[in-house]
Amino acid sequence: MKTFFIMAFLAVTQLSCAKKELEVKHVSTETPTENLKNIKVVNVEDPVCKMPTADFLKFTSDYKGKKYGFCSLACKTKFEKNPEKYLR
């Protein structure tokens, strides 16, 4: 009987702790007034956080003659401090 309760507890625990796909959202206080969807960038995902930039492109930065897109000011700022770290 004790084994039954332990098994039931484990089953309920496993179901309640099922992995869910997490969604990362960046919040910025300095967001441009319009999305930059028409700007061509060389990357399809933010080099810092790896979020797709196609739908969330708000910020860009030029580095070595190429324009990179970012989902947030925070990611752009991190990239500009050390671009080589994120372009490996």
Image (cartoon, helix red, strand yellow):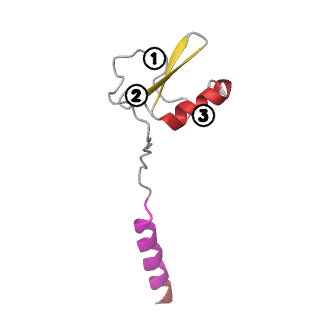
Residue for badge 2: 57
Q: Are marks 1 and 2 in contact (CB under 8 Å)?
A: yes
Q: Which segment did they paint magenta?
A: 5-18
What secondary structure is found at the residue carrying circle 3? Answer: helix
For marks 3 and 1 on the same chain, the one whose residue lies earlier in the sequence: 1
> Above or below — where is 5 with respect to 17?
below
- What residue type is disc 3 on? Lys
User: Residue 55 bears which disc, if any?
Assistant: none
Q: Farthest top residue?
A: 65
Q: Are marks 3 and 1 in contact (CB under 8 Å)?
A: no
Q: 16 or 2, which lies in front?
A: 16
Residue at 65 percent across and 30 percent down: it is 81
Q: Give percent across and percent down for residue 83.
A: 64, 25
* Magenta span main SS: helix
- What residue type is disc 1 on? Val
Residue for badge 1: 41
